[in-house]
Image (tube, rainbow, N blue to C red):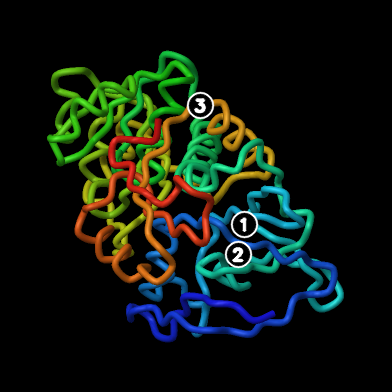
Amino acid sequence: MRFKAAVLHSWGSPFSIEEVELDGREGWTWLRVRATGICGRDRVVWRGGFRNLKTPLIPGHEVYGEAGSRPYGVYPAVEAPCNGSTCTLLLGETTPGGYAEMVNVPSSSLVELPTREYARYAAAVCGVATMIHASKVAGLGPGDKVLVTGSLGGVGIHGIQYLAMRGARVYAFTRRRQYARLLEELGVEPVHSLDFYRRTGRVDVVMELVGARTVNESMRSLRQGGTLVLVGNIGGEPIVIERPALLVMREISIKGTAAYTIEEYREAIGLVAQGRIRPFYKAYKLEEVNKAYRDIEEGKVVGRAVLVIDSPAGEEEAHPQGAG
């Protein structure tokens, strides 16, 4: 199969838009890509943050499009035969991903969509599914107080909506004060300094989306026996605990959350389709992928940057205040 794709040839370098020719795997399905979200994990891949990966590669695991004229999302952990057994391949990492016009995936990874609003799903589903899973890891319950760092990113701005919907009291941390009213409209309390707990009291859970840059400050906001869930580490720097005594004396738990299940992925799709989650995104053409990465790095995107590829009319637009 021959099609256009954004190919990464060396870590941290611009993508090359080129025609590629790839063979499909036996028994897999070709999906015509309509929209692909640019995830924080993609940026770690781009920087060379996963040492097991090799270039050239085509990233992109938040993929939505059509197969046989029907609309689908692709669950990104795909199963494939591997040396006589079965192994898990990660879309956009160990198998070519969705920064392309076409992607080859097993039919078992295809989840049918209720609508054809591809960019909306690409913007919000991964973030919501991630927070669904992280909430289970944290043992989060209604009424719990939760701090979310990185609250204007793709996981953050969609995840806080899920937490608020679940009945949590959410403190959304961002240094961009101009978005305070927007966060309030989403049912959460914006905070611009991580010593906010001196005013509000300490929290039960921290959803740490930023990682090394905020983890030591955010940890101080936890109550005795509280839990910090490490969801991401966007800069890729080593995480160093500056005050181990804080962990010891407050009996704080630190837990990781790797991904989400296909059931959680389906749940997130349903929430977006029902309008219970408001998508935030800025759309780019495939050929604009390098501009999208620059805009993300410069803080010009609220929510997700989404690559829109030959999409139905009305999807190729920016939604900095959320899609209605």
Q: Is residue 140 left or right of residue 70?
A: left
Which is more toward the observer, 2 or 28? 2
Location of mark 1 (residue) = 76
Which is more toward the observer, 276 or 84? 276
Q: Is residue 267 above or below residue 93?
A: above
The image quarter in which residue 194 lies = top left
Q: Which callout, 1 or 3, points to the residue nearer the camera? A: 3
The type of residue carrying mark 3 is Gly
Q: What residue do we see at 44% from left, 16% from top?
A: 167
Location of mark 2 (residue) = 91
Q: What residue do we see at 61% from left, 64% from top?
A: 90
Q: Is residue 10 above or below residue 124?
A: below
Q: Quadrant of the C terminus?
A: top left
Residue 86 lies, in percent from the top left, at 80, 66
The image quarter in which residue 147 lies = top left
Find out whether the residues at labels 2 and 1 contact each other: C-beta distance under 8 Å.
yes
Residue 198 lies, in percent from the top left, at 14, 22
Residue 85 lies, in percent from the top left, at 84, 70
Question: First in sequence: mark 3 or mark 2?
Answer: 2
Q: Which callout, 3 or 2, points to the residue nearer the camera? A: 3
Question: First in sequence: mark 2 or mark 1?
Answer: 1
